[in-house]
Structures are given as structure tokens and as C-alpha cells.
Amino acid sequence: MPGHRFNPEHAHKLDNPERRKTLPPEQILQDFGIGEDDVVLDIGAGTGYFSIPAARMTAADVYALDVEPQMLQVLNEKIKAAQVSGIRTVEAIMEEIPLPDACVDKVIASLILHETGDLLKTLGEIHRVMKQGGRALIIDWEKREMDQGPPLHERLDVRELIPVLESTGFEIDSTRHIENKYYLLYIHKE
């Protein structure tokens, strides 16, 4: 069971130039296809790495969910500084998403699923809040030793994650690997 949680004192690491070069949020979201009417849920939103650019792409709500109040405080400051609207910060755990059924068009789960205490429950919650035909983007660490990220034993191997997603009612659209460091998994709700 994962025990690693990102330390909010290291929030500055979430928005550094190297990460932006490797995982450019605007380009990734453009490729994901967020439309101007899409309601978006960003799970593990942190300091708004994906929430803020997503809010610039849609006129609908962007729910920025994070368990850490410190991260949401930083995010609220960044929202004001960026002068974006439509972001609703939500303090909650990903195993219990406090949103109604079938209310979200797009879900972003970036570098967060490895932290869940109950993967099946988390995926069930994502499935529950997504509209029929809704799409999700999962970004996580490759399961290999490296200087960054969570310990190897806490990482989710994409080959092991795919059957779990399928058993939860998702279909796999495509998988992409970046610099042997991250994988991007595009899925949709059947």
C-alpha cells in the first residue's frame, strides 16, 4: 500500500523549468482535447500546474482537488495572480470525491494515483463522477529506479494498471511514454 505523499514544503518543485520542458501543461492539455464547454476535474491539483491552464481552455468549471490545505492555499494565490476564473478548489481525498455522479467531462490525474491508499476505490470514484463518454488522462512515473519521484515499490506499472482500469469500466485509448520517466495514459468511460 502506498505510503508516500508529496510534501507540500516542496511545492516549488512542481513548477520548475525542467518539469515544464518535459511535461508542458498547455501542450499536454491541448493534446488531451479540453473543449470550451468541458467540466474538468484535476485530482491532486497541487499548485495548479494543470488546473490553471485547463481553466484558460474551458468556460466551464475546473475542480482542483487536493488533500493538502497548504497546496490549495498556494493554488488560490496563483489563481488570483493569474486572473483566471472558474477554478473551484476542493479539499478532499481521491478515494472520496465530493462531486455528484456523472458531472465531469475530463479528468486529469497527474503523478497522483501511486499515492492512493485504495486504487480500486479511487478509480471507482473517477468513473462515478465522469459523464458517459468522458475522458481521463493519467500521468504517472515509470516503474524504474530514478533520482526523482516516489520509491520504486510505490510506483504503478502501466502494464499492471491497464487491466485494473479495464475492470473498473474504462477503455484504453492510447499510451505515451516521455523520456523513460513518465507515462501518459488516455482512457474513456464506456
Image (cartoon, rainbow, N blue to C red):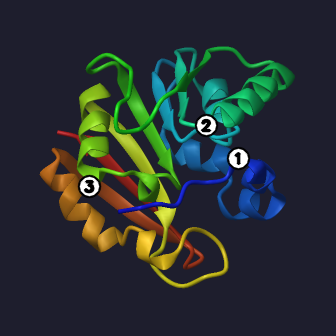
Picture quadrant of residue 104: top left
Q: What residue type is labelled 3?
A: Ile
Q: How crowded is mark 1: few (under 14 residues within 10 Å), some or many (20 or more)?
A: some
Compute the Cα span from label 1 to label 2.
7 Å
Which numbered mark, 1 or 3, is in the foreground of this view? 1
* Residue indicated by mark 3: 172
Label 1, secondary structure: give it.
helix
In this orientation, which residue lies closer to the viewer: 148 or 84?
A: 148
Q: In this view, does 160 lie to the left or right of 142?
A: left
Disc 3/disc 2 C-alpha distance (Å): 30 Å
Secondary structure of the residue carrying numbered label 3: strand
Residue 114 picture quarter: bottom left
- The residue under label 1 is 8
State the quadrant of the N terminus.
bottom left
Of pointers 3 and 2, the one earlier in the residue sequence: 2
Q: Mark 2 sits on what residue? A: 68
Q: Where is residue 124 in the image (x, y as percent from the top left)?
A: 23, 39
Amino acid marked by disc 1: Pro
Q: Position of residue 58 (x, y in %)?
A: 57, 22
